[in-house]
Amino acid sequence: MTQLSAAQKQPVQGVRPSTDSSKALYGGKSTRRITVRDITAAKERGEKWPMLTAYDAMTASVFDEAGIPVMLVGDSAGNCHLGYETTVPVTMDEMTMLSAAVVRGTSRALIVGDLPFGSYQEGPVQALRSATRLVKEAGVGAVKLEGGERSHRQIELLVESGIPVMAHIGLTPQSVNAMGYRVQGRGEEAAHQLLRDAKAVQDAGAFAVVLELVPAELAGEVTRTLQIPTVGIGAGPETDAQVLVWTDMLGLTGGKVPKFVKKYADLREVMGSAAKAFAEDVVGGTFPLEEHSVH
Ligand code: KIV
């Protein structure tokens, strides 16, 4: 039998190792609820996966039926669902209510609930109290919080207490008042800090880490360095997973969306036209017709 050299055994660059497709996070056969262990196994298989935000049961059920394996009840609900300007005002009561709705609307996706600003910054005990609420009252399978080195004690206590944590580094929107919305990790010192943050959250026990708005090359380096999966948003193509805010991805968000968003539909146009057609029917007396009436 011909022996393969070490170089021949390496996967061709850009080509993922073959996977058992029945286990795949996206497109796999399993209908049971996905767990963080499945996410860890996907990194070992070299599998890429998609994540979307969701803030209500009906939208979440559409994404669940489409096979999206992980949904984030992000505090982006603040600006994408609740009408705030930023994520800063979002409360634990709001996150608990929205997370519970998304859990109720889904049966397969792993649901990750975001800890809002002010619900974990005081320290590990406050973080545990807040995360426990999302797990017990909303039924999420994991929580997310922002910060690298600065949040490692919170992550450690949550993980020790049995709550899986997705970390979030790079641009952290809850710190908008301090850092603005700027690309993070540009320049040598900032790149080193991002790598330190990534290692700190992995060492603290996070099962995955979001990299938001960081240069693509640096996100690739972090992804190759870590054992846990990276989830990119505005972080180029080399992360293990990609997340988008659903209202951006489906074209519901009004005004300008960030450069890294790909719009897969124009729901704002579809919904606006449908609302106008309904209004014109009502005003013109063409709705309801006989077929919409009961007798
Ligand atoms: O709140 C959110 O939607 C997020 C994603 C952008 C990762 O944190």
Image: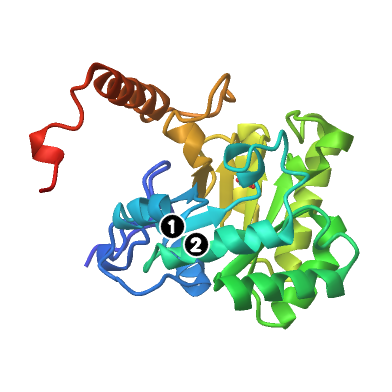
Q: Residue at x 65, y 76 (%)?
A: 163
Query: Is residue 132 or residue 32 the one in the foreground?
Result: 132
On the question of residue 91 being in view, the answer is yes
User: How many C-alpha atoms fall within 10 Å of the one at disc 1: few (<14), some, or many (≥20)?
Assistant: some
Q: Position of residue 198 (x, y in %)?
A: 73, 54
Q: Is mark 1 within 8 Å of ligand 1?
A: no
Q: Residue at x 29, y 26 (%)?
A: 278
Q: Amino acid at mark 1?
A: Ala
Mark seen at residue 291: none
- Quarter of the figure with residue 150: bottom right
Residue reaching furthest to the bottom? 161
Q: Residue at x 86, y 59 (%)?
A: 121
Alpha-carbon span between mark 2 and mark 1: 5 Å
Mark seen at residue 57: 1
Which image quarter holds the N terminus? Answer: bottom left
- Quarter of the figure with residue 273: top left
In this rendering, the answer to whether 147 lies above or below 264 is: below
- Quarter of the figure with residue 95: bottom right
- Disc 2 vs disc 1: Cβ atoms closer than 8 Å? yes
Q: How many marks?
A: 2
Mark seen at residue 101: 2
Counting residues from the start of the chain, the first of labels 2 and 1 encountered is: 1
User: How many C-alpha atoms fall within 10 Å of the one at disc 2: few (<14), some, or many (≥20)?
Assistant: many
Q: Position of residue 144 (x, y in %)?
A: 66, 60
In this rendering, the answer to whether 281 lies above or below 41 is: above
Helix, strand, or loop for circle 2?
A: helix
Q: Residue at x 69, y 52 (%)?
A: 168
In this rendering, the answer to whether 230 lies above or below 217 is: below
Q: Amino acid at mark 2?
A: Ala
On the question of residue 166 being in view, the answer is no
Whether residue 174 sits left or right of residue 166 in the image: it is right
